[in-house]
Image (spheres, grey):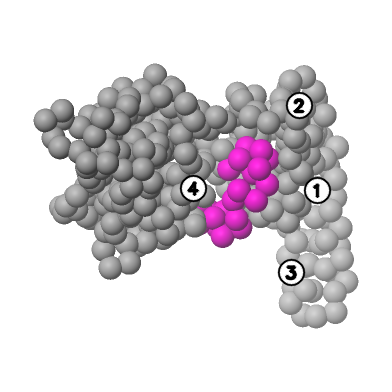
Amino acid sequence: MTNDVTPESSLSSSEILAGLNLPRVIAGPAGKAISRLIAGIAEFGSAWLQGLAQQIGDSAAARSAGQNAIGDAAAKIAASDDALVQRAVHALVAKEYRHQKNKESVVLKTIDILKNTNDQNPLTTPPNVEDDWLNVFERYAEEASSERFQDLWARVLAGQIRKPGTFSLRTLRFISELDADTAQLFEKWAPAVINGDVIQTPPQVRGTNFADLLRLQEAGLINLSSGTLLRRHTVSEREKIAFRYKTHAVGIQTTDATTLQYPAAPLTKVGREIYSNLDVEDSVENARQFANAVSKYKVGRIVYGTFLRTSGEIMSPIDLWVRPAQQKLPRKAIGQVAGPRKGKLDKMEDPG
């Protein structure tokens, strides 16, 4: 028979969980969620297959005693055709096996992510993931047959385990319908996302860039409204402020109170949640483009370096822009410009 399914000898859920050495902070919630995905069908064996066949046979017998014409007709077909019942068993087993194989692939990738997670607050254990959320997630994860989407669902589950509520049911549905082209396009622009909520855009958006942004808006990942927006942020005198990427940040030091502005396209709620789930490699070139685009009136220096979220520091900063010595500064700031300190940077406020 074609499409034969020969289940490999799977480990039990308890055996898979044993010895994973997950970080203590997530072992509890992770254990519950992972057990949910690998239990049941994971316990493949002849007894399970025989039980399944018996259930189908019992169903056929019950239908043969049915009281409506459609049920009787279906029962007669099933009862008179052993091969039909066998094909039904085979189709069901093959489908469930594929689903289980997909889910277990997602589980293994999730475990790898969790094991490599550096917990910023090891004394706090997050609550368990809600059953309703897991019900929806399971239906989507079992259909993920490609490596790309198994990776994506694994990062979603890991993120939800670390911080329940990170991903809404609406975002789960969006991901389940996400096509590869749109996913690749969003990944292309992800390194240009600042503070997790806007995409820094070129000063003049045209050609391919404009077409890309339109496609992202049509997909529901960004909101251009009436076009590319200008993001503004008011800062005080001699303030240090960080514009964050994934692991790095651009630090701006002002010489006097001013309003910083730069072209940006806001992410939607779905876009923000998906971005938080992506593994993005920061680029100094994006930081240079941002430094070139941001307004520099009353700005003394712009730097780029690794950002420590726990302390707000920018480590090993490199200069992207320094006000030329011959360029006059506001009278109030003359003689007061200092280089960026290895100190805490004010957190970015939402300019609204």
Judged by depth in the image, the label closer to the viewer, 3 or 4, is 4
Residue 344 falls left or right of residue 27: left
Residue 164 lies in the magenta stretch: yes
Type of amino acid under label 4: Ile
What residue is shown with label 1?
Answer: 53
CB atoms at circles 4 and 1 under 8 Å apart? no
Q: CA distance from mark 2 to mark 3?
A: 54 Å
What amino acid is found at the position of numbered circle 3 in the picture?
Ala
Kindly report the distance in space between the C-alpha atoms of the residues bearing marks 4 and 1. 42 Å
Q: CA distance from mark 3 to mark 4?
A: 46 Å
Q: Position of residue 40 (x, y in %)?
A: 80, 41
Residue at 16% over, 30% down: 324
Q: Residues within 10 Å of mark 3 (few under 14, many from 20)?
A: some
| Residue at left offset 74%, top offset 73% | 73
Instruction: Tell me the CA gap for discs 1 and 2.
Output: 42 Å
Q: How many marks?
A: 4
